Structures are given as C-alpha cells and as structure tokens.
Image: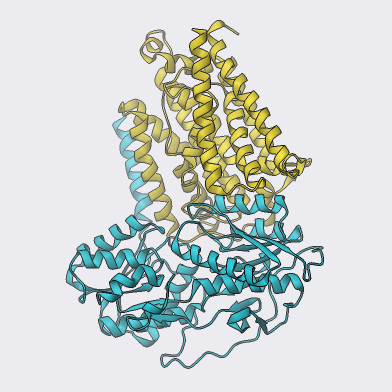
Chain colours: A cyan, B yellow
Amino acid sequence: MLKKTLAFALGLGLMSGAAYAQSAWTGGDDLPTNPLACDGTPAAVASKPYDGGSPTNAPDRKGKPLNVVDVPKLIGIGYFNATSKGIADAAAELGNVTAKTDGPTQANIDQQISFIDNYITSGVDGILFAANDPVAIAPVLKKALAAGINVVGYDANSQPDARQWFVNQAEFNGIAKAMIDSLAKESGEDASFAIVTSTFTTPNQARWIAEMGAYAAKCHPNLKWLETVEAQEDNVLSFNQATTLINKYGDELKGILGMTSVATPASAEAVTQAGKCGSIAVVGLATPNAMKPYVEKDCVKSVVLWNPVDLGYAAMYVLRAVADGTLEPGATSVKAGKLGELQVINGSEILLGAPFVFTKENIGNFDF
Amino acid sequence: MTAALRPFLRHEAILFVLLVAALFVLAGQSDRFFTIANLLNQGRLMTEIGLVALAMTFVIVTGGIDLSVGSILGLCAILLGVFWQNLGLPLPLAMGLAVLVGGVAGLVNGLIITRFRVPPLIATLATLALYRGLAEGISQARSVRGYPDWFFVLGQGDLAGVPTQLWILGLLTLVAGVVLGMTAFGRATYAIGANETAARFSGVPVDRVKIAIYTASGLVAGLAAVIFVSRVSTTRSDMGTGVELDVITAVVLGGTSIFGGRGTIIGTAIGLVLIQALKNGLALAGVKGDGTIVVIGLVLILAILASNLFSREDG
C-alpha cells in the first residue's frame, strides 16, 4: 500500500513539476504583438476585408422596434453596470429599442452560453455580448446568427465569424502603452513590478499582458517583470494576492499593474494597508469611482481606462445600425449618436477611441 | 418492491408531480418552451451535469460525497488538449486517455477514503483543490483550440435527430439504474450507506465497492469533460468550476439521502430534469438569472420538506 501511495505522490509531483517551465510574462497569450512607437506616433490603419459573420435570413428590421438582450461576462459589478447603463441610455435615445441586461453572477463560460442559448430560443432580435472565452462562446453565437439574430460584441471579443461587429474599447497596444508608460514614469525606468490579472486565459487581459511585454521590451527595456498572479475578478482574492506580492518581494517591488476593474482598487487597498503608498506605484485599469479614494490620497496617480458607459452606448448604436442595414460589410465608419463618427478597424471592429488616463486633476469629473 | 423501498418511491412520486406541474406552468408562460427543439437543446446542455450526477447518486447512497468532480472535469479537459496538441497523440487516443485520467483521479479519491479512513468530505475537498491546481498548472494558462470537425459531433452534433451526448446520457442512466436497483453491487451500495459496520460484518466488500464507486465517479467526470470540450470547442483550466454543487443539488432534490442508504437513479433523473426545466423555462418567461437561482433554492427546500412530511406520516 505504501508503495502505491508513494507512486501516486511521485506521479502527481512530476505532473505539477512540469507545470512550471515557462519564460515570457505569464498570463499573456501567444498571438503576434504590435507595440506602438515609443513617442506615440499613431499607427497606420491597415485596411482589411470584413471578416465578421452575417445572420441567415434575417427579417427586414429597418426602423422597426428591436428586442435586444445584453449578456455581459457577469452581472453585478461596477464595470458592467456602467456598460449596461450606456446600452439603456442609447436604447432610450433611439426610442425604438427595448434592451435588457441579463447574465451569470460569475464569469463562467458554461452559464453564459446557457443564457444566450435561452435568449435565442425566446426569439430576440439582437444580442449584445462580452465574451468570457472567445472560442467557447462561438458555437452559440453562430447558432444565433443562423436563427437570423443580429449579434454585436463589446468589451471582450469572440472569433470574428461568430458575430457581425465588435466594438473595441481601445486597441490592445494603446492600453499597453498607456499602462507601461505610466508605470515607468511613476516607479522609475528600472523598477521591478508584478501584475494582478483575472485569469491567465481571459482574452482581453491576456492580450494586454502580451502587448505590454512587447512594448516594455521595445521602449522601457530596464523594467523588470517579477510575476503575474490570477485573482479571478474577485475582490477579496485580489486583495490577498496583492498583499502576498508585497510581502513576498518586499522593497524590491516598486509597482503593481492591475489588469481588471476589481484587481486595481484591491491592489491599491493592499498597498495602502501595507503603508507602502509612494514606494509602490499602482497603475491599472479601473472605474474612477472605485479609485477616487486612492487617487485623492495620492496613493495612485494613473488610472487607465475608457468610458464603459460610452462603450455600451456605442455597442447599442452599432447593433441598431446593423439591424437597419446602414452598417454593412466594407463600411469605414459608423455614426454613434453623441459619440459622432466611429472608425472601423481590423475588418469588423469599431474603435471607441484612445484610452483615457484618469488623474487627480480630472477624476472628479467622472461618475461611474 | 419491498416495504423498505416505499418511502422513497413516495418522494419520487411527489417530485414527478412537481415536475409535471412545473412543465405545465412554464409551457403556459412561453410558447417557445414546450417545443421539441428546445427540449432537445436543454438535454444537450444538461448532459455533463447528468452524467456526473449518476455516479454521484451511488457516492451519496454510500453516505459519502465527491466534491472533486468539477476539478476532475477541468483536469481531464486540459489533459485532453495537452495529450492531443502538445504530445501529438491521435485525438481518439487522447479522448480515451483523458477519461482514463478521470478514473485514476477517482481511484485516488477512493484509496484515500478507504485506506486512510479520511472522511469523504475532507478527502475530496483536498483533491478538489489538488486537481484544479494541477489543471491550472499543466495548462500553463493556455487554452487548446482548433479541434477537427468530427470531434464536434459528440458535443454539437445529432444522431437520429437527438443530440449525440443525450444518447450517451440515456444509455448510462439505464445502466446506472439497473446496477443500483437490480444487482448485488447495488444492494451492497445501499447496505454500506445504511450501516457500514453491519455491511462489513455481513461480508460486503465495503472498501472494494467504495473504491469502484469513486473510480466510476472520476470516469464519468472524465467522460463529461470530453463532451464539454466538444460542446464548447475549447479547453480551459477553469472548466467545471462549481459543477459539484449543481450535481449534488440534482441528486439531493432527487430524494437521495445525504446520510446514505436511500436514493434512486430515477429520482436523480427527475431532479436533474426539474432543475434544467426551471432554469430554461424561467429564462424564457423573462425571469432574470438571479431570480432563477432563488426559485431553484426554494424548490429544493420545498421538495425536501414535503418529502419529510409525507414520510413522517407514513411512519
């Protein structure tokens, strides 16, 4: 018996041993990166043919009332409350759209698929989504397209052919540049830093981390990456992970990058409670309301984000334009109400704009 | 059927009435609920939970519990991808091996529980963390995609108009029902749950039966993993998180006593269908996700209260 047990222990040990053999920045994906120029020269927009999908036998919805459901990654967090508000605002402005938000209470692929599946059966006209996994969500979205439903993504993309358009809140390399530039400015060019992300496979976060790695190598080569830790999108877990980082690396740690709207305030709180304000810079993606206390106390200097209310708002306008037939494959821009004309990039994506860095001077002007 | 079996037939009868009532009410709320297409589609969505629930019924009838099934599912899913893509094995072999790993993971549970006398709750709580950790470590945070088209037949295709995986679930439900209800193995399972010491002294090979049951639990979790990967066309290390709770809910709703000794496969099947019908029907009727969870909680409490009430009158 003892022998058997030892064999098992050995087997398990070997398996877990194989798990730690990786270089690069953990949590990044392995897609090609495209870092921006260090001085901020805008990248040329490469023209690319439309690569989105199209619904089968969609009825003529031009000017007709639309019944739209929005299925975000999860409900009940500030970020998706904000996108949901933007969608509702746009729906009210348009007047001929009924929109509701429904989704899982945890960022879970299986549950999100079930929600979308049920709404396909219930017969909606349009689906807005933010994918928990770009591939896993594809079959159910293709099913929606096959049922003649208009499908538009925002925030987190799916495979392009599984939806019609995707509203891109900011290009990955743009966010990566803003994050790394802010970090280098605040903690010094040769600082050591760690990253708190949601999970290593979450598409947005993985892309940003890969782009940040590429941009740092190009423009801030002396920055030293220590570790990436997973914290789901969980408040307590994020706080614990950040605290662990602070204790583990001690004075070596000069910066923490928060990759989610949950991880950044939790990391700031961890730094505050550890009494390390000023010696550890926290730079990250977060909503302004969550960060106001830390920004006002000078514990956090840069919060990088776009406006999620605008993101939801744009997604709703894009869906309406697709249903009306005014946004067709090959278009180069689309009108989105108060946001004006938005640019089409990467074949079937619509760019919301450049990322926004909230600082002590401007954060008071935002309330979401 | 003997007199001893009557009380839990009673629970299944109550549950069945509840299910029929729920189906009627839900069908009245949305004309898209009671359609063949929707019902078959729901069958597709509940297969993974259903498979694991079959083995879980055996586990809980012995008075045990297996909290590690969701983690085993995640581990097998990741290994399927690793075997196929990283080790370059043919996909059918990788599928077989993934299921086998599930069996080994279950066997480890069984050995820990029987050889070291660790309570199943503790043992599988530990392996829940262990297997999930392995899944996340082995995957190196990468998901595996790009499976060939034939592989998707399992999770997304149809056979004679019925989702492929529903055939597997149906077949295994039948097998599980026969094994638990009509064989010596099934009687040994009940005996262990009713009184383990008595069973041991009556010559029931308690440890061997338990090990077989936990191994089977791991095997079906592995099978569920393969089907899940085929359904969603990618592998991730967080697959199957929380599945154990959905499974235990279905089994307990189906009338299996958490203290062991009581429970049937038919009860589990009804419990499973009832939960899936509620989730789907309420969503179609326009109830949001959070409302649905509340209703399922209430139904679980009500079903168990009602069943306790009736069995008390009986005695």
Q: Is residue A9 above or below residue B214?
A: below
Residue A196 % position (x, y): 35, 66
Residue at 34% of width from left, 34% of height from top? B123
Residue A160, quarter of the rendered image: bottom right
At horizontal 20% and vertical 76% (from top left) the residue drawn is A279
Q: How many labels does the image show?
A: 0
Q: Nearer the viewer, residue A61 or B238?
A: A61
Is residue B110 visible to us here? yes
The image quarter containing residue A66 is: bottom right
Query: Image quarter for residue B34?
Result: top right
Which residue: 71% across, 67% down? Answer: A96
Report the front residue among A151 and A15.
Answer: A151
Comparing A338 with B236, the one in front is A338
The vertical placement of A230 against A174, above or below, is above
Q: Residue shown at 37%/73% (left/top)? A: A284
Quadrant showing the N terminus of chain B:
top right
| In this view, B268 is above or below B276 | above
Residue B288 relative to residue B75: left or right: right
Q: In this view, does B236 lie to the left or right of A113?
A: left
Q: Where's residue B151, x and y in %? A: 66, 51
Q: Where is residue A123 in the image (x, y as percent from the top left)?
A: 73, 54
The image shows residue A352, relative to residue A6, as above or below, that is below
Q: Percent x, y for residue A180?
A: 37, 80
Q: Report if residue A25 is visible in the image.
A: no
